[in-house]
Amino acid sequence: RPRVLSGIQPTADSFHFGNYLGALRQWVDLQREHQPFFFIADLHAITVEQDPAVLRERTLRAAAQLLAMGIDPARSAIFVQSQIPQHAQLSWVLQCLTGFGEARRMTQFKDKSAKAGEGAASVGLFTYPILQAADILLYRPHYVPVGEDQRQHLELTRDLAQRFNSRYKKTFRLPEPYILKSTAKITDLQDPTSKMSKSASSPSGIVELLDDPKVSAKKIRSAVTDSGSEVRFDPEEKPGISNLLTIYSSLTDRSIAGLEEEYAGRGYGDFKKDLAEVVVEFVTPFRDRTLELLEDQKQLSSVLEQGRQVATEVAEATLRDVWQRVGFVAPA
Ligand code: AQP
């Protein structure tokens, strides 16, 4: 079975609709016919300051949410990145293959460091995409399911894999991004030309899966819409309505054309009211299930331990090849 790998940062109390529709839903679907490795990216989380107790808590909440959305530990290895030391070790080798200018071109770093203010961004935030390349290449996956914002990092990953392979010996598979066009960029409910993002969106622009469902419904009902009154998919002219149509369509598996037809002549109010109900129906059981899973920390730890063991086996084998190819002397 082809391998897939992806990760998510434990940097909020809850995943949001961008994370879920852009990436996590594909994780769930892909596990049927692939061999998945899914990790909680706590090493990435500390590229910006984190409270240690909160980080620990959020890591477990992330694991519970993954299980609640249908990641099955019998099919997928779910693990915590910091428990596999090979990620940081491979990252060092890849950093030594990355040009400074090449790293500086990463747009996510440019955006985030600009926000942090002159000189305030950490070196970790700068080298983040290289750690991400290591996360991926260690497991030699075929596909990496992510949102559109990760495409450039995936390209860097492929470049580094190719560079290592040609400088030393073919070691890494060149992974393909797996980006679903329809949900590649879920946008902010209040600013529908920007992506929904935990660090950039205002509270009313972002729907969190673990929020009180009533609050989420209200956010949908007060989402910014566009001029006119026609429910029509047109991301250029109607970014707000198009984003809501995307969310509606992917939560219900109904086609956008079918939804346009259903709401023809009915105006935005009806449409948003119905979508708010769809959202409530989705998040309510998800939230209950997550909270239930969080009650049983023993079970969560055992899922993560099982994942750690599977991941370690693969990561150790890859790193052994890398160390040998780079020219490091093996211990006697
Ligand atoms: N708005 C989005 N639309 C589609 N996909 C998205 N992803 C994130 N936002 C959207 C995808 O979610 C996965 C997890 O990404 P992450 O752990 O890097 O989460 P994140 O980037 O921390 O989420 P945010 O909200 O985007 O955080 P900030 O604001 O800190 O950058 C990835 O596959 C990502 O593509």
Image (cartoon, rainbow, N blue to C red):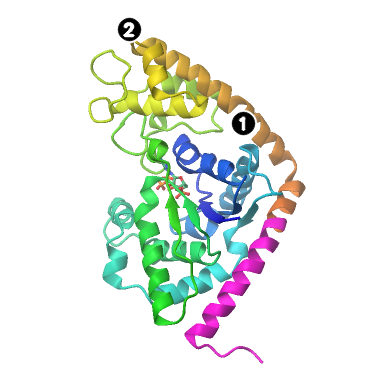
Residue at image location 29% in from the left, 67% down from the top: 102
Q: Which mark is residue 287?
A: 1
Q: Which residues are magenta?
A: 306-332
Q: Nearer the viewer, residue 203 or 139?
A: 139
Extreme top residue here? 265
| One can see residue 52 in this view | yes
Task: For the N terminus, give its image quadrant.
Answer: bottom right
Decide: few, some or many residues near mark 2? Use Cα within 10 Å; few <14, some 14-19, many ≥20: few
Residue at image location 56% in from the left, 52% down from the top: 55
- The answer to whether residue 11 is above or below residue 293 is below
Q: Is residue 148 left or right of residue 172?
A: left
Disc 2 residue type (three-letter): Gly
Q: Is residue 33 left or right of residue 125?
A: right
Q: Residue 317 in magenta?
A: yes
Q: Residue 212 in magenta?
A: no
Distance of label 2 from label 1 (alpha carbons): 34 Å
Q: Is residue 288 left or right of residue 197?
A: right
Q: Nearer the viewer, residue 207 or 120?
A: 207
Quarter of the rendering containing residue 285: top right
- The answer to whether residue 223 is above or below residue 109 is above
Q: Which mark is residue 265?
A: 2
| One can see residue 124 in this view | no
Give how far across and how far down residue 119 sits, in percent.
29, 62
Q: Nearer the viewer, residue 22 or 47?
A: 22
- Judge depth for marks 2 and 1 and give the one in front: 2
Quarter of the rendering containing residue 3: bottom right
- The answer to whether residue 94 is above or below residue 324 is above
Give how far across and how far down residue 279 sits, in percent.
51, 23
**Marks 2,1: beta carbons within 8 A:** no
Instruction: Give the total of numbered labels.
Output: 2
